[in-house]
Amino acid sequence: STPVSVRSVDVMIRINSNGVVADNLWLWRADHSALASGEKPLATEAFHLVKAGEFPANTALEVFGNDVTAYGLAAEHTVNDVTKWYGQGGKTFFYQCELPYDVSQSSFALKGYSGYALDD
C-alpha cells in the first residue's frame, strides 16, 4: 500500500455546475506530519512541517460553473494555485488562504501560482 504521506490529489473540489452555493468549506492540505520512525522532533514538537513531496495536493478548489457563491471558504497549503476560479458572475464572501510552507520562490511564485487565481 502507498504510504499516507505520498498519497496525492490533483483538485480537492471541482464545481462544474451553475448556481452552486458553497458554505463553510475548509479545504486543507496537511501542513505538518507525524514523525517518521527514528526522526528526532524539534524541541516542544511531536511532528514536523511538511517537506516538499509530502501529502501532495495541487489545488483546493476549481470553479468552472457560472454564478457560484462561496460563503466561508478556507483553502490551505496546496502547491499550485490554491483556488482557481474560471466561472463568470461568481462571488466569495470570506476567504482564508494559507500558502504552502514547503515551496520555494522558484517552485511557486515564479511559476505564477497564487492563493486565488481568476480566469482572464
Image: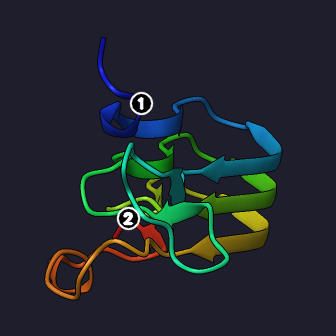
Say above or below: 109 vs 38.
below
Identify the residue at horizontal 34%, vertical 46% (top origin).
Answer: 56
Say above or below: 112 vs 16.
below
Quadrant of the image containing the C terminus: bottom left
Q: Is residue 86 visible?
A: yes
Say above or below: 102 vs 60.
below
Badge nearest the viewer, 2 or 1 = 1
Question: Whole-percent x and y of residue 73?
Answer: 74, 59
Question: Whole-percent x and y of residue 75?
Answer: 62, 60
Which residue occupies the foreground of this view, 50 or 103?
Answer: 50
Say above or below: 68 vs 108.
above
- Assess disc 2: are there few (<14), some (14-19) or many (≥20) residues with their C-alpha within 10 Å of its C-alpha: many
Quadrant of the image containing the N terminus: top left
Q: Is residue 68 left or right of residue 21?
A: left
Q: Give the SS element for disc 1.
A: helix
Number of numbered discs overlaid on the protein picture: 2
Identify the residue at horizontal 36%, vertical 50% (top origin).
Answer: 38
Q: CA distance from mark 2 to mark 1?
A: 23 Å
Question: Whole-percent x and y of residue 32?
Answer: 53, 59
Amino acid, disc 2:
Asp
Q: Is residue 56 left or right of residue 84?
A: left
Question: Whole-percent x and y of residue 20?
Answer: 73, 36
Identify the residue at horizontal 71%, vertical 72% (top origin).
Answer: 96
Q: Is residue 31 visible?
A: no
Which residue occupies the foreground of this view, 69 or 62?
Answer: 62
Identify the residue at horizontal 54%, vertical 52% (top origin).
Answer: 30
The quadrant where residue 98 appears = bottom right
Q: Residue 81 shows which numbered tag?
A: 2
Which residue occupies the foreground of this view, 38 or 46?
Answer: 38
Q: Which residue is mark 1?
A: 4
Amino acid, disc 1:
Val
